[in-house]
Amino acid sequence: MINNTNLAHWSRLQAKSLDAQFTNEMVTGLNCSPFEAEAIVEKVHEIYTPLLETSQGLKPGQIQVTVIDASVAPNIPLVKAKQRLVTLTLHAGVEDIEARKIGSVPALRQKRLCRMCQEAFQQGGLLTLEDLANLFNCGVRTLVNDLAALRKKNIVPPLRSTTKDMGRAITHRRLIITLWLQGFEYSEIARKACHNVDSVANYVDKFKRCAALFASGFDVHAVALMVKLSTPLAQEFQQIHAQIQGVPHRLRELEEFFKKNRVRNLKQRSQP
């Protein structure tokens, strides 16, 4: 004989849960079907659970903000973009106090900018300059100046604009090629530029092909067509090629690539 009393006991307990209350409100208050109500409850859990799970674990000086998900393509409007909740360290305590003691206010802001961009990126999100301007209570122009100062130190924080190669910001592709010309290996470049190794290898390969074609006298539009790149990207590679200042072994590597490319082109032309 089945003891239904025990089953009824657990059913009554489940009925007293917050989920059950919320579902009941959806059904009776908004005239949703039970299926729709359960779907809404699941979506609420999906969106708010990360906040509820981490809000109690925030350290002093940390905040939680919603940023654009790192997977969102650059052509997606922000209002339609997937978002992600991330935890950022606005004030790192003694570390920031010491930085301010030995440096300036801009230096401290730049330190925080780099740290918070990296934290957001590691959690699968990307900050924008507008996000940082709001967090730091300053103008975007101030942050543009900070980024210019960081670039002189070969530092490019993983902002949405730089990681997605948007706007007039220094692009990660330029940083990647510059670091490669300076002799860094793919793994080091990937770490510094916040990209994966495959992306780094792909950028370097395209740059080599473009540089070889520029060296052979092709113009930007022809190179863009032959390498299957956008004209702006081909123009950027042309600028880098014109200003090449690399370590000796990288320049030799480029020259060897040029020779192989010339030999390949001659073979193709000689074929009937």
Image (cartoon, rainbow, N blue to C red):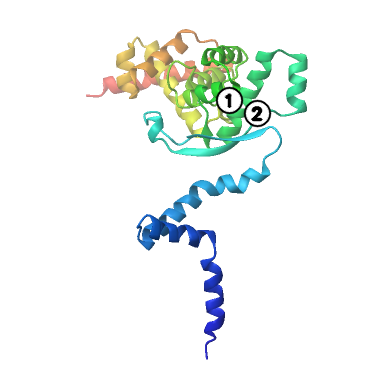
Q: Secondary structure at mark 1?
A: helix
Of 116 and 164, which appears nearest the observer? Answer: 116
Q: Position of residue 178 (x, y in %)?
A: 54, 17
Where does the C terminus fall, quadrant-wise? top left
Quadrant in which residue 186 is drawn: top right
Quadrant in which residue 120 is drawn: top right
Q: Amino acid at mark 1?
A: Leu
Left or right of residue 57: residue 72: left
Q: Position of residue 48 (x, y in %)?
A: 52, 47
* Vertical comparison of 166 with 216: above or below: below
| Structural crowding at the residue carrying mark 2, measured as other residues with C-alpha within 10 Å and reported as few (<14), some (14–19) or many (≥20) | some
Residue contact between numbered discs 2 and 1, judged by CB atoms under 8 Å: yes
Q: Residue furthest bottom?
A: 1
Q: Which mark is residue 231?
A: none
The residue that mark 1 highlights is: 135
| Structural crowding at the residue carrying mark 1, measured as other residues with C-alpha within 10 Å and reported as few (<14), some (14–19) or many (≥20) | few
Q: Secondary structure at mark 2?
A: loop
Left or right of residue 15: residue 230: left
Q: Which mark is residue 90?
A: 2
Q: Residue furthest left?
A: 272
Q: Position of residue 89 (x, y in %)?
A: 65, 31
